[in-house]
Image (spheres, rainbow, N blue to C red):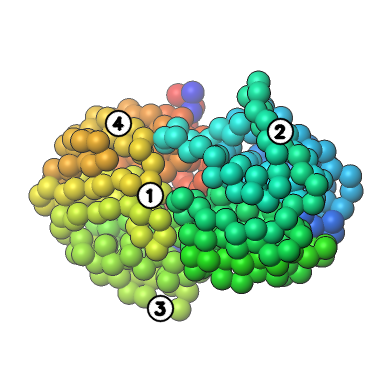
Amino acid sequence: MNAFVVNGPTPLEGEVRISGAKNSALKAMAASLLVPAKVTLDRVPRITDVTLMAQVLQHLGARVEFEQNRLTIDASGDLLDETPYELVKKMRASIQVLGPLLARLGRARLAMPGGDAIGSRPIDLHLQGLERMGAKFTSQHGYVEGVADRLKGVRVLLEFPSVGATENLLMAGVLAEGTTTIENAAREPEIQDLVAFLVGAGARITGAGTPTITVEGVDQLGEVRHEIIPDRIEAGTYGIAAVATQGDVSLIDLRPEHLELPFIKLEDAGAEVIRSDGEVRIRMSRRPSTLDLVTLPYPGFPTDLQPPMMVLLSQAEGPSILTENVFEARFMFVDELNRMGARIRVEGHHAVIRGVERLSGAPVRAPDIRAGAALVLGGLCAEGRTEVYDPGHVGRGYEDFAGKLRSLGADVSVEER
């Protein structure tokens, strides 16, 4: 069994270059199924989820090559319409091939998606929107099957600004007949990046980054090259790590505007945050101040940065309250953090965090990507040795996590136990 082995405490110092965004790369890969020509994606992170999505595309009939951080995809040939359970169970983002397959082939058969155990994430909004566009679905034996003649553009009002549903519907709308309007659409930067990729291929889309996205259907997309945006969650994780360890870290090659609220919260906690073009320096020289924090869809505080912020607040000088409004099971790792000496009590969607002066190294287990990274961060803040088991979760979302931490002075490695 492998584990991250962390010896702390260690203040992080130095520069770290931010990789391409996981949640942008995966969706652009799915959208490549709409393009019967060569697709080139630059700045693609070398992470497990990208490898899994590449396997999904290859199974469907696309040709995929991955060299350094450049991914080329050719889906110009005949495509299959079914994704197998053994691939889909490992990664929830595989549901994003549903819209492209229906738009391109008029049919799709997908195993129900898996992924992180952070709470219920039903695909009802995806299916309801696609049904309004003319698709018909049946569900049995763990698979969803959809069929459609050419999809029709319609107005879809989402009950919740779901990122996945917004992406699936706008991808389906690209080749639909007529105009598709998505109301209460998600506004995340990754949505805007997906739209930029599709527009580069010849799609007609307006309104990305606003609550209303309009897609005018076209007959066909063409060859495109696109660079993936920086990963705001990776950048936020290292920024929070700088504050939690009382270090001095420069984040290189990111878009600071994508992290406006998290940086404000780090300043509220007592950090110095120096913003410049494509770079942010974060310095901290004392224990954090307490905060009240609420996760919300973008531009609110991202739920994916809630676990590392929990680690930061576990060392604050006093009590903090953290409210999780996106995923109801995101507090699953609290018991593990408490094993390291944190004092956290969960009450429904709220976590009451009473800061301690120093965490203590302990063996813990990572339940998902972001919690795993947070527990490694906890080890950097803790006295002694921490072992974080199931490190593979972290590799699904962070490129060379241990290596980048070591470049900042951390004593961290992945070892077989």
Among the two numbered marks 1 and 4 on one chain, the one whose residue lies closer to the N terminus: 1
Q: In this view, which residue lies farthest toward the left?
A: 318
Which element carries disc 1, helix, strand or loop?
helix
Amino acid type at circle 1 is: Thr
Residue 198 visible at all: no
Answer above or below: position of 67 versus 248.
above
Q: CA distance from mark 2 to mark 1?
A: 31 Å
Vertical side of 23 occupied by 115: above or below = above
Q: In 3D space, how far apart are the residues under numbered discs 2 and 3 (Cα atoms)?
A: 49 Å
> What residue does disc 3 label?
276
Q: Residue at x 34, y 57 (%)?
A: 301
Q: Earlier in the sequence, mark 2 or mark 1?
A: 2
Nearer the observer, 141 or 384? 141
Give the residue number, with chain letter if any, for mark 4. 336
Between marks 1 and 3 in the image, the one whose residue lies nearer the viewer? 1
Q: Is residue 322 left or right of residue 219?
A: left
The secondary element bearing badge 3 is classed as: strand
For residue 88, what is the image quadrant?
Answer: top right
Q: Nearer the viewer, mark 4 or mark 2?
A: 2
Q: Earlier in the sequence, mark 4 or mark 2?
A: 2
- Check residue 145 in the rendering and tell me which mark sits there, or answer none: 2
State the mark number for residue 253: none
Q: Amino acid at mark 4?
A: Glu
Q: Residue at x 61, y 42 (%)?
A: 127
Q: Amino acid at mark 3?
A: Ser
Q: Counting residues from the N terminus, which is met first, the one under dot 3 or under dot 4? A: 3
Mark 1–mark 3 Cα distance, whole angstroms, equals 25 Å
